[in-house]
Image: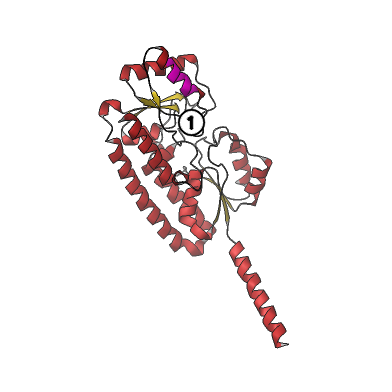
């Protein structure tokens, strides 16, 4: 009898243990950059899921039936906002009636946002390239996680503060690295115009072959304009992006060559998506460092 009671108690304890272990809130983030914030702040207390993997373009991303199922099962949904996930806006609005669906950029002061004339009245969504602005998103995510698990408030705040300190160090490091590029060579030519905030914060002029969104294709006039800038400024390197097709940057290189000049294509930059999870570029800090080192080496 005692043996049976002991077995029963052990079984109950194991069930309780497994239930507690599996009772983590599910947080789904659209982009890898947001997913990484959840990992840094929530750590082992949150089941963090990234919706868009390496090489995925959020401008063009359409949610599959499987994605919608995941979103419905989540306790919290975090997305960039500012029209980055343009084809998922209606889904977020519907889901927000049942559960929190939060744009992590919502707390950034409007005066800090860029509003390009060619982006149909929307703000530039690529705020993560200004590390000082991305810190606002970290505090927004932390607040959302505290509302999910208020009993862990103190731990989440500690994790947030530790991560913000790392971002302050990263911001300073980026400025130091960009200063290694001669002033007359601080001109960054990329596939699409994702580095506006980067250029503003770190003092480098940015020229994107395509506009803010990758939905629009560059035409022959766009390519020729960029070619003229490259030749006039003797730019040594232009850059492709991990989540954008390379054909138009290749067309620029060919057009420069046709005019008797040459330009190299640098290491691919990570823009709208990070690297694989098992690489340094699979973290926000690693992605930024990879990009900066690639840019400095290409232009220096």
Residue tagged 1: 122
Colour scheme used in the picture?
secondary structure
Q: In which quarter of the image is residue 171?
A: top left
Which residue is at a point 36% across and 37% down the rendered structure image? 292
Whether residue 125 sits left or right of residue 233 in the image: it is right
User: Where residue 298 sits: x, y (%)?
Assistant: 35, 30
For the stretch drawn in magenta, the main secondary structure is helix
- The quadrant in which the C terminus is found is top left
Can residue 109 be seen in the rendering of this structure?
Answer: no
Q: Quadrant of residue 58?
A: top right
User: Where residue 154 sits: x, y (%)?
Assistant: 43, 63
Which residue is at a point 37% across and 48% down the rendered structure image? 167
Residue 70 covered by magenta stretch: no
Report helix, strand or loop for mark 1: loop
User: Where residue 252 sits: x, y (%)?
Assistant: 44, 19
- The quadrant in which the N terminus is found is bottom right
Of 88 and 228, the residue lying toward us? 228
User: Number of callouts in the render?
Assistant: 1
Residue furthest top in the image: 259
- Looking at the image, residue 61 lies above or below residue 233: below
Residue 249 covered by magenta stretch: yes
Of 239 and 196, the residue lying toward us? 239
Whether residue 47 sits left or right of residue 169 in the image: it is right
Which portion, as a residue range, is magenta?
A: 248-255
Can residue 205 be seen in the rendering of this structure?
Answer: yes
How many residues crowd around disc 1 within 10 Å: few (fewer than 14), some, or many (20 or more)? some
Which residue is at a point 32% across and 20% down the rendered structure image? 234
User: Where residue 30 sits: x, y (%)?
Assistant: 55, 43
């Amino acid at each position: 009898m005692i043996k049976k009671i002991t077995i029963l108690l052990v079984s109950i304890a194991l069930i309780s243990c497994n239930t507690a272990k599996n009772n983590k809130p599910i947080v789904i983030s659209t982009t890898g950059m947001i997913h990484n914030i959840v990992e840094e702040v929530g750590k082992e207390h949150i089941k963090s899921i990234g919706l868009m993997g390496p090489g995925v373009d959020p401008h063009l991303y359409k949610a599959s039936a499987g994605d919608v199922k995941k979103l419905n099962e989540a306790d919290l949904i975090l997305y960039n906002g500012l029209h980055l996930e343009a084809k998922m806006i209606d889904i977020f609005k519907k889901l927000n009636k049942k559960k929190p669906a939060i744009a992590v950029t919502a707390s950034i002061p409007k005066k800090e946002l860029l509003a390009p004339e060619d982006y149909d009245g929307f703000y530039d969504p690529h705020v993560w390239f200004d590390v000082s602005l991305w810190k606002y998103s970290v505090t927004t995510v932390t607040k959302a996680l505290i509302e999910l698990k208020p009993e862990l408030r103190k731990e989440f705040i500690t994790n947030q503060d530790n991560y913000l300190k790392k971002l302050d160090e990263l911001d300073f490091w980026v400025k130091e690295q960009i200063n290694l590029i001669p002033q007359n060579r601080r001109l960054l030519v990329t596939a699409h115009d994702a580095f506006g905030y980067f250029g503003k914060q770190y003092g480098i002029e940015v020229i994107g072959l395509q506009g803010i969104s990758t939905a629009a294709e560059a035409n022959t006039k766009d390519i020729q304009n960029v070619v003229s800038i490259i030749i006039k400024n003797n730019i040594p390197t232009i850059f492709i992006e991990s989540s954008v097709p390379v054909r138009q940057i290749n067309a620029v290189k060919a057009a420069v060559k046709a005019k008797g000049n040459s330009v190299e294509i640098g290491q691919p930059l990570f823009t709208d998506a990070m690297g694989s999870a098992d690489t340094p570029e699979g973290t926000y800090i690693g992605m930024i460092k990879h990009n900066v080192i690639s840019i400095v080496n290409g232009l220096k």
